[in-house]
Structure formats: structure tokens, C-alpha cells
Image (cartoon, coloured by chain):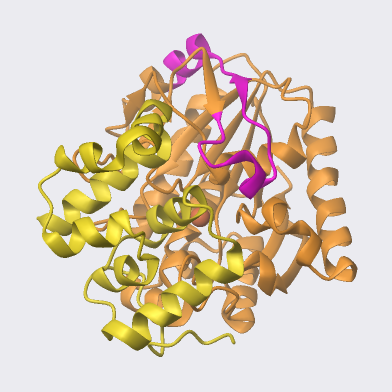
Chain colours: A yellow, B orange
Amino acid sequence: MSLYTVQKLLYQLNRDRSVQQRYKDDFAALLEDYDLTGEERHALAAPDIGLLYVMGVNGQLLMHYAALCGFEWDQYISAMREGLAEHGSVRAGLYAATDDRGAVS
Amino acid sequence: MTLVYAGVCSHAPGITGRAQRADPALREPFYASFRQMGEEIRAQQPDALIVVAAEHFANFFMDNMPAYCMGMAEDYEGPIEDEQWLGIERRRIPGNAELANRLIERMLHDVDLAYAQEWKFDHGVMVPLHFLTPAYDVPVIPININCQGPPITPLHRAYEFGRTLRKACDAVDERIAVVGTGGLSHWPATPDSGKINETWDRTFLDRWLANDREALTSYSDEATYFDAGQGGFEIRTFIAVAGAAEGSTGELYYYAPIPIFAVGCTIARMHL
Ligand SMILES: [Fe+2]
């Protein structure tokens, strides 16, 4: 259920400019509204895009979140690869890398 | 017969967002085909453009996920994404709530369709509109097919949905164009972004151009996931358009893998 909550937060953040304003003003307070584990809160706040990817966050939600956090395209792709190297295979969802590394270098 | 145009196109955010990074020898003819499709649509003077899209958790989430949903709003806003990241400015896009209402009423005779009076467009609709109706002067009616969060609708239902959509379009007086938009094989938003299975794409396109219902709907989701990635689930939008154009065959305007766009870039139409 908790991964669901992470994704719900990202869904609301990606589409709603008032939630985006809260993210800018006080992200910690926004995170308080969601029932998250310590790892999830850390990954969102850092932001640790690689860890969020490995946790199984839907790729489309994560791609938009990475853009919102100001990640350039190449930086975003490398963050996912670094996540795999550091935390192992994607734990859930459909967005696993086909060889756990990323086929295109 | 008031369906006046049926086509399909790609919608990956890189198409506009990472335009400068693509090989111009591939990018320019792709853009030209995209714009040509737009000119053909506008030449038909449609009263509305229905975009059969596979959005990406812009409006619909797993708390209440419709298999099929149609927009019934006066207007829409998009993109939800950062404008610079997508390379498309945020704006209002006109809808046609009254026409959508009549189409939905008609379709409910055959299919349990959800509808929504609030809807924000993500790249899945904004990228096509950027090329097809760059002045944003054609009223748009969006349809979303859930290709994102399983369980997802089976392929034969997507074809059937297209047939139902056609019936509804033909039952109203307005002139309607329909464009389906999705990826063929691709692994977007993963480290594999840029991987494209061209052989798989070309086989699928042959089936689409022939409007071979049986072959189009014969893929299992397991096989599609393996051969075409999770992005391959978006073939539902192409299959729905084939259903809307049942009895017609198609013409391929453009196909080429463009890795930085993360998809085999496709423009094709049915000859109704
Ligand atoms: Fe998509």
C-alpha cells in the first residue's frame, strides 16, 4: 500500500499547481499528509530518483517528477542506472529495465 | 457517414522536448509527415478532433481507473508538464461538451464508457496537437484508454470500442476526425529509453495497415511486455482507430526509430 501512496503523492504533485506550490514552500509539511515509510520520505525529499525507480514507482510519474525537480534528461537516465547499481533490481511494477542496467548506453 | 478522418501518430515527450538532439535527417521528414496529417485533418474542416490517447496518470489514478473515458468539458488545459521540459507552452484547448455528451449517450448503448468534465492534457495529447492543430482552433474531445495501470482492457475490446465510436460518430451530423496516439514497442521512462524493436513495430504496422482485426488483437500482454515493453501496451489506441475504420485499409506516411525520442516514430492514416 505504501508504494501506492508514494505514487499518489507524485500523481497529485505532477498535475496540480497548488500542490506544486506546497512542494516549493514546505515539502516536509506536504509529505506529512501522506502515510510513508522513512525510506520513501527520504527518497522523495532527497530527491533520490534512482531509489524511487528501484522501489517501483511508475516510470511516467517518476519521469515527470524528475523533470519537476530540474533533472536534465541524461541526468535522469543516469540516476535510474545508479539506482540499479546501488539498490539492485526494480522491486515492483512494469518499468523494470530489461537487463537491470538499461540496454542503451 | 460523418467520420471524416482516421489516423495514428506517436506522442513521446522527446519529440518536442528533445527535438534538438535528434538527427535532422530523421526528425525533419517525421515532423513533415506529422504536419501533413494536420493539414489533411484541417482540410476536412472537422467540427471536432477526437484524440484517442493513452495518458500517463495525468487525470486517472489507481483510486478510480476507467478502462475507457471520454472528455465532456468545455475546454481543457495542458500540458501538465514543465513547459520547457516538454517544449510546449501551457494553454487552454477548446472542447465541445455538447457534442461529446451526444456521442457518449450514443456509445453507452454498446459500451460502459466513463466520462469526465475535468481533464488536463499531458504529452500524450499535447505533442500530437502541437503538430496537428498548431493554432489550437479545432475543438478537441479526448478519450483515454488505460494502458498504464493493469488490469488493462483486452485488445479485442479496444477494437470493439473503436467500432462503437464509429457508430456514434456516424450517428451525429458533425464532421469528426479521430486520431489515435501511442507508442509501438518502447521502454519509455526506464534506463532502456531509446530501445525500439523495429521488427515488431513493422509487423504490427502491417497488420494495422491491412486492418487485420484478428492479427491485431492476437498479441498477449505477456508477449507484448517482453517484445515491446510496457510502452507496447499503448497499441490499444491504434487498435481502437482500426476498429473505428473497420473495412478500410491504411497508408504509412512515416516510420523510423528515433532513439532520443524513445519510440519508433509513426504517422499513418486509414483511407475511409
Ligand atoms: Fe505514452
Q: Measuring 35% from the left and 51% from the top, which residue is drawn there?
A: B157
Q: Which quadrant, please, contains the N terminus of chain B? A: top right
Tell me the magenta residue range.
B78-103
Q: Is residue B172 above or below residue B265?
A: above
Residue B171 appears anywhere in the view: no
In this orientation, which residue lies closer to the viewer: B20 or B159? B20
Asked if residue A39 lies left or right of residue B20, the reply is left
Q: Based on the displayed image, in which of its 4 quarters is residue B113 positioned?
A: top left
Residue at 33% over, 43% down: A11
Q: In this rendering, does residue A99 appear at all?
A: yes
Q: Position of residue B7 (x, y in %)?
A: 67, 46
Residue B51 x, y percent position in the rendering: 57, 37
Q: Quadrant of residue B233?
A: bottom left
Q: Position of residue B8 (x, y in %)?
A: 64, 50
| Residue in the picture at 70% in, 22% down | B138
- Residue B115 is one of the magenta-drawn residues: no
